[in-house]
Amino acid sequence: MSAKDQATDFEKEVVGFLNRLDFKDVNGASDSFRIGGIQVDAVGGHDRTLIVVECFMSLKEEFKPLRGKIEGFRGKIWTLEEKIKEDPVYGKYANVRYALAVKNIRVRHEDIVYANETPRIYIWDENFLKYYEDLYMKIGKYAKFNLLGEMGIRPEPGSTMSLPAFRAEIKGHIMYSFLVDPKELLEVCYVARRESKKERFYQRLLDKERLRKIRDYVKAGNLLPNNIIVAFREDLSEEIRYTPIGGSTENGVSYGTLEFPKDYRACWIIDGQHRLYSFANSVESFWMPVVAFQKMPLEKQCKIFLDINKYQKPVPPDLLWDLNGDMLGDHEDGIISRVAKALNEDGPLKQKIYVPSKGIRKKKGLLSLSGICNSIKKAGLARSTTRNEAANPFYEEKAKKCSEKALAEGLKGFFHCVQTKMSDDWGLGSKGFCLSNSGIAILISFFELIVRALKFQRKDLNVLNYQQYVNAFAEMMRKRFPSPQDLKQLKARTTSQLGRDSFLREAANYVATQTGDSSFSRGLEDPYEKRAIDIDRRVRAAINLVMTATYGDDWFESELPKIDSSIYGQAKKALGGGDPKVGYSKFTLGQCKALICDKKLDLFKEYFIGPEGFDDEAELEVAFRTIIKVRNKFIHPDGIPPKLKDLELFETYSKIMGKCLDRLEDRFLPKKVE
């Protein structure tokens, strides 16, 4: 196919796009289509506005300057507008908007800035077209109103919505509460498109399957009582009218009539977009409760959105971290997000991180943005002191914040060193260790240990000083994990946080020995051992709580032992002449298992077995045996590390055991006063 044919096909795609979105008087994709003698690639109208589209494509995907194309398009505008007024079909359109549709072109930021100058030309790249095609498939004709709103197109002047509403002022924000037919609201609400660079949008994309489920739920006769939460656009504040009927209550709540412009983007949806848009392709009639805020800054809307989604259906963590960088300013999470995205811009990790706002659809083979951000946060690299309580050299005391540039450069230098010293593994990409999500998390934690060591030695943070530690780490990897099978087992072992922390301690000990820096692994505990010891302590304390509640404070030293005589005798012997009130502290974990699972199951069953605990007595016993087995490997090491299967079972059972103990402690221990 020739270049001209491909260009014509792209024009046909744009014409088809305009037709599908139900624009009127659509035409184009033909050399013979002209307005006043000027060849036009595509046009489509809505109400009194005509959209004129120029199409431009490259035969291969590339960064390509658009300034010349924008200038050429602008050069036609004055003549076009004069000819449109005279055209028998298009003369009825009083307003004209211009769009440059591009294909196989990665749009540069400077071109977007230039296109936004007057007269403005909206750039429709492939992400834009795909987004609205996708939105059309989900919400039908209402996708067009979203597009019109994004292009600043407004309906006929004087078009308003008038609704009975309650009004209140809460914490400085004006809030309205009203009921509305969702079909009316659909035209004025706007789904914030995250890929747009014009504004810091925060919404997640619509999920078609979720829309269907909600639509079917309502169709079955069910109610959706939850409020849709929206915010009126700030620049519409002066056009919003509220007329009270009667007076207000003591707390300032009043009832009256709310009137606001029926603008295509009058309201941005903070929460409830799936509930609202589930009515887009529905014939159901329904009064939907809405809470609308007036004069609420975008940053506050974002904060509400993020807070709501911490406690409701989770937003994809990569998206949340991506948004943090745009919206949280000097907050720690905002700084971390921008540092992680800076790693993706240049250096060893360039274009190796999945960043949703880049418009990349496939995450396969890319590192998780949320994983990197969580690792930086866990290491404390954006706080005044790092995870291991070292003064953070990247933190600026005067500014009271971390230096994004210094931290990003420090991490880039470290990863450059890793890339050099572990080049074979690095070359494996996500199939190796270094560029896997678990590997990168461990390396960031390892970097924090290096930072601590160099800070203690008063040495500069640079590649030269990183090398001795990275060399030792690389040596350990070659010796202990020489084969693909060894590497596979390591990656399986480090999928969990416990596994990563355990391996980090192992690596730190090796590096400390090889470098002669004995303080390098100072303070690191094996998390499996730590958790096992914690469960050991809590189980013994739990036995004391239940036995005391059942038999009284002197249950251990009572005239007739309340527990198995053999267990009692061994514990009393270990106690010696100590206080009988702490006799329970001498039970071994194996004795605790015997007491809870066998001897006194009737007393403990409600806390350990059930929907939020273990399935039955047999699983409870298996859980205890697993925890004891792993614990003994650390308390009484034999040189053979625990099996991966045992560690995996330990993680599962220790979490359930922890929840059981939480429930028991909540029952017997006094509640903390906040």
Image: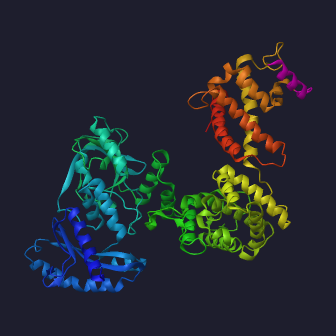
* Foreground of the two, 456 or 540: 540
* Foreground of the two, 315 or 430: 430
Q: How is the image coloured?
A: rainbow
For residue 135, say whether it is visible. Answer: yes
Q: Is residue 565 magenta?
A: yes
Eyeballing the image, is 620 above or below 347?
Answer: above
Eyeballing the image, is 561 above or below 94?
Answer: above
Residue 623 left/right relative to 184: right
Which residue is at the far right?
577
For residue 229, say whether it is visible. Answer: no
Q: Please tell me which residue is depicted at 54% across the width and 68% down the height of the picture.
A: 341
* Foreground of the two, 235 or 283: 283
Residue 130: percent from left, percent from top: 34, 65
Q: Main secondary structure of the magenta part?
A: helix
Residue 638: percent from left, percent from top: 84, 46
Screen quadrant of the C terminus: top right
- The image shows a total of numbered marks equal to 0
Looking at the rendering, the stretch of residues picked out in magenta corresponds to: 564-578
Q: Please tell me which residue is depicted at 28% across the width and 35% down the height of the picture.
A: 220
